[in-house]
């Protein structure tokens, strides 16, 4: 039956873009609910920055250990009738949706511990989906399309986040928590189905075959040898510097963003729904037209040049934010501060992903290496969110913005000498 259905494959650009757009649309819808609409809803209910930050941190923990959870599994995956790595994409989707359904059993939306635990479980399966999608990108996307593919994944994520933020900021206030969860299950399930509808290769089954099909057995690389080679690669100075940059970027961003969101609602009188809508609009702008422009630029100029330009833009943006807050203009310039804190970092991700993928490709542990960089990025976000409650009184809002500006300025200096964080051209020459 599966053979009678003409499904697209990753061999064609349209199939690649559709699958990866949908996979990240799924992630964005859940993030729009959990990390934006629900977080702002909690702020509106009077919960503290420390409590909201704890919700962020718990939901993000599986992303921080994603390489250990799934990287070696995907890099050492055997052939399957559903596709070597698409089979794991499907498994991750099923597990993630089952985890989200557990939210219907939470008795009180204020039970942050239970809600955070459910999203922690969901994140574990969503991380499997993400690892499978990244491995598919590494295997099937030509080097000359990495920038546009990064723009596509970013567009999917921010479109999902914006749609989820707008939809769920309304539904949480109007329909309640349980109804919002049901809407989330339906919307995310549809996006997930679109992601897995694209076959990995023309000979793969679209759905599980009705009869068992012989798959050529193949040896699996010993885990010990795999891990030793991975460790040797990640201990190189270039890799350590890139890891430090990834952690510092998201640590400083999360530290500022959590403080800013709570300050806008509780100190400057913003409505939580209005804040969610503003964040959604900015995300749409950065993740669609902005992401496309940066993706094309990265493919034409090279990822190192695009990365350097965006790091410099972020340094200037957060320097300006620190100045506005320090001079007492945070209340009147709240919208401008929100825009400066949202747009340049969102565009930076589009340039960062091709650079990190270029540093990871060409080895048998490509997915694990890439996920390590992304996990350290997420670990920085988790640590920044967790530290937001304690760091606020010490640094203040202006101080956290200045810290972010300093991190981006240091990153700009590193990216100006790309051999310090990226593979030299000679190491990349043979990679398609």
Image: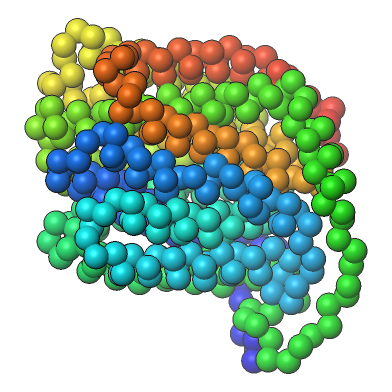
Image coordinates of residue 240 in percent, x first then y, are: 69, 24
Q: How many marks?
A: 0
Report the residue at 45% width, 32% height from top. 383
Q: Position of residue 186 (x, y in %)?
A: 35, 72
Taking depth in this image into account, of 13 and 168 the one nearest to the observer is 168
- Rendering colour mode: rainbow
Q: Which residue: 56% across, 29% down?
A: 246
Residue 236 position by quadrant: top right
Q: Is residue 37 left or right of residue 285?
A: left
Looking at the image, can residue 253 be seen? no
Residue at left offset 64%, top offset 26%: 242
| Residue 115 figure quarter | bottom left
215 relative to 8 in the view: left or right = right
For residue 224, above or below residue 300: below
Quadrant into which the N terminus falls: bottom right
Task: Determine whether 412 is above or below 365 in the image.
Answer: above
Residue at position x 42%, y 48% in the image: 59
Which one is in front, 164 or 347?
Answer: 164
- Residue 176 image point, x, y percent: 17, 63
In the rendered image of this protein, does residue 130 appear above or below residue 307? below
Residue furthest toward the left?
A: 269
Question: Which of these two is toward me, 207 or 131?
Answer: 131
x, y (%) of residue 161? 36, 50
For residue 81, above or below residue 339: below
* Residue 208 in view, yes or no: yes
Image quarter of the C terminus: top right
């Amino acid at each position: 039956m599966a053979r009678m259905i003409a499904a697209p494959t990753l061999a064609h650009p349209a199939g690649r873009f559709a699958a990866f757009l949908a996979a990240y649309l799924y992630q964005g819808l859940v993030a729009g609910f959990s990390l934006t609409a629900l977080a702002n809803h909690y702020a509106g209910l009077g919960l503290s920055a420390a409590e909201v930050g704890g919700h962020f941190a718990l939901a993000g923990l599986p992303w921080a250990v994603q390489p250990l959870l799934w990287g070696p599994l995907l890099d050492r995956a055997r052939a399957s009738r559903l596709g070597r790595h698409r089979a794991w994409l499907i498994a991750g989707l099923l597990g993630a949706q089952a985890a989200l359904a557990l939210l219907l059993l939470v008795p009180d939306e204020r039970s942050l511990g239970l809600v955070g635990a459910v999203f922690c479980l969901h994140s574990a399966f969503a991380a499997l989906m993400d690892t499978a999608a990244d491995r598919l990108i590494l295997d099937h996307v030509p080097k000359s399309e990495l920038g546009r593919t990064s723009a596509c994944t970013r567009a999917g994520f921010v479109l999902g986040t914006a749609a989820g933020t707008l939809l769920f900021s309304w539904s949480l206030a109007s329909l309640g928590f349980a109804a919002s969860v049901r809407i989330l299950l339906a919307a995310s399930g549809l996006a997930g189905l679109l992601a897995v509808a694209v076959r990995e290769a023309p000979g793969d089954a679209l759905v599980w075959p009705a009869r068992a099909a012989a798959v050529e057995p193949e040896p699996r690389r010993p885990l010990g040898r795999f891990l030793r080679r991975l460790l040797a690669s990640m201990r190189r100075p270039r890799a350590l510097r890139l890891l430090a940059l990834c952690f510092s970027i998201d640590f400083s961003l999360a530290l500022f963003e959590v403080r800013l969101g709570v300050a806008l609602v509780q100190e400057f009188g913003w409505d939580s729904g209005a804040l969610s809508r503003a964040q959604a609009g900015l995300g749409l702008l950065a993740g669609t037209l902005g992401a496309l422009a940066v993706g094309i630029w990265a493919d034409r100029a090279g990822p190192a040049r695009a990365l350097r330009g965006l790091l410099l833009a972020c340094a200037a943006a957060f320097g300006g934010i620190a100045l506005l807050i320090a001079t007492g203009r945070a209340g009147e310039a709240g919208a401008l501060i929100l825009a400066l804190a949202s747009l340049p970092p969102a565009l930076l991700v589009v340039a960062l992903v091709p650079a990190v993928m270029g540093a990871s490709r060409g080895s048998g542990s490509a997915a694990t290496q890439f996920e390590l960089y992304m996990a350290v990025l997420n670990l920085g976000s988790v640590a920044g969110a967790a530290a937001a409650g304690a760091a606020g009184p010490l640094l203040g809002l202006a101080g956290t913005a200045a810290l972010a500006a300093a991190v981006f300025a240091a990153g700009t200096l590193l990216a100006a000498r790309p051999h310090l964080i990226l593979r030299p051209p000679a190491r990349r020459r043979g990679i398609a």
